[in-house]
Image (spheres, coloured by chain):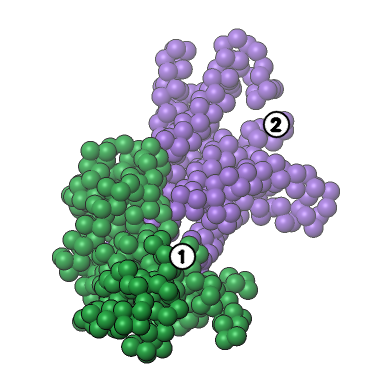
Chain colours: A purple, B green
Amino acid sequence: MTGAITDVMRSTRAELLRFRRWPAVWVTIGAWLTMTALFAYVFNYVSYATGDGSFSNEGTSTDALLADLLPAAVPQAVAQGMPMFGGAMMMVLGAIVAGNGFGWGTWKTVFTQGPSRQSAVLGSLAALTVAVATTVVITMVFAFGISLGITGVESQSLVWPSLGELGRGLGGGMLVMEMWALAGFLLGILAKGPALSVGLGLTWALVLENLLRGVGSLLSAVETMTTYLPGTAAGSLIGAIVDPPSSGDGTPGVLTVLSGTEALVTVGVYAVILPLIALVLMRRRDVA
Amino acid sequence: MNELVVETKELTKRYGDRLAVDKVSMTVHRGEVYGFLGPNGAGKTTTLRMALGLIRPTAGSARVLGSPAGRPEVTQRVGSLIEGPGFYPYLSGRSNLQVMARYRGLPDSVVDAALERVDLASRGGDKFKSYSLGMKQRLGVASALMGDPDLIVLDEPTNGLDPAGMADMRALIVDLARGGQTVLLSSHLLAEVQEICHRVGVINGGRLLKESTVADLRGGTTLRVRATPLEEALAVAMRIAGDDKVELAIDDNGDSIRLAVDPERAAEVTRELVHAGVDVHEVTASERTLEEVFFEMTGPANGNNNHTSSKEKVS
């Protein structure tokens, strides 16, 4: 047993080393940070400063617009982008981490080093989790940076979010991002490559689930099913944290279909089941 | 400690209705260099993959270092390069080895030693994707050497290497065996196997045709005679050595007769031939190359490629 734990830790260290030096990882995280900067801050600040209404803040008063840009609102501002956009980027990350190993022959090399397959895959999952957690923390720090800048420029008094809000933002965001990363990892293993898994995963998260929700509003049988889909659950979890406007269009992907607790449990179940399937698949499979 | 480092029993792998490996039972002893010999697609790599636990046998079993293949306690003591080197293209050669060293729980210090050993130290900082085929191959061997494993499995280790690189690789393998490590290598290069292996297993069409020492396989020294007229020479040779000890060999220098007799009898054979009025052009003691043996064994006339032709051979 201790041998297995040592093996998982060795595998995690090995994976973290290769993640750190992998440009694709930094490109993915960079793309997400850019999206956060643009959609949570730049566009809204420009529209506040110029008094224009942009697509993401229609119907919001300018005071409320500014309040969303200040440090007190950082946990909500960051978390809003996670169920759909942040999740999509993390899914890409999970898919390239697991999927490329087949084409490059690196799963084969890794499986002949010593750690058992379960240990190696668990190590890879652990390293992916570290990468996701790092991304969430970097995003918060990054958002605080921008927000503090706006506070200074607009000569606003500095108000920090409460620890509870910060904790909910970090925790909820982490869970949502992790669930999508794990989904990407599983897809990478199912498709044995990054291209198909990224394509399928993004189509699912960005298009199909939205369509199903549309069908669900017409057919009650489909509606029950769509309620517990990963995107709906992730959107509802974040919805419970950010408390989106009941009328009008909020941030895409942020929902209130499930209650906070229901959403938390559903996302948690996905976060356990997805990696388990990945582990079982890799345990049995012939690795060429 | 078990003297058998690798032992497979009736190892079989079936893909759909194609038998890739058919009841292969092979043994590799401690401290030897074992050559796994066969043409492309003979089942060498598939067998080695099963011995490493990368793929599951359809039937039969493989034991390595006394335990079932693929167990963590086994793979930890085995270094391998199988079916081309699999590394992260975006990492340098050195970083790739550092990643693998972490998987093995080895300190970073083994990395530079391994790079040095395959002559890659000066290029260790370059990205793996920028390496030539030969350099990638050498990095794969370096990775297999890290941590001084008891068994080193190398699948076509000289693939993509230039002649100098091949010579270096052969010297390295001989060196490993001298240091007490067991090496199992597959190759389709017979000269290479003949030069460095103690024992060989010949595989074709998924079946292990023969397993023996290189010397046994080559079958000792024979007497090669070039004489005319050929028919009469053949008759005389058969009278001296017996019908089953004589065969016709065709090579670049024309037809010759090969007698499976002690080369000491060269004078006697020559005398008899001359007595019979045959012109003797050349008498030499010759040893069959592994290549000749191999082609005899795997050639289509031998019926090893399909099961019907062995019956036709009778007619």
- Is B50 situated above or below A88? below
Q: Are marks 1 and 2 on the same chain?
A: no
Marked residue chain, label 1: B
> Label 2, on which residue?
A249
Given residues A257 and B50, the one toward you in this image is B50
The kind of residue on which mark 2 rests is Asp
Q: Can residue B288 be seen in this snapshot?
A: no
Q: What residue is at 37 percent from the left and 89 percent from the top? A: B239
- Is A124 situated above or below A166? below
Q: Quadrant of residue B148?
A: bottom left
Given residues A250 and A9, the one toward you in this image is A9
In the visual, does A33 lie left or right of B308?
A: left
In the visual, does A116 lie left or right of A172?
A: left
Given residues A277 and B23, the one toward you in this image is B23
Location of the N terminus of chain B by quadrant is bottom left
Marked residue chain, label 2: A
Secondary structure of the residue carrying tag 2 is: loop
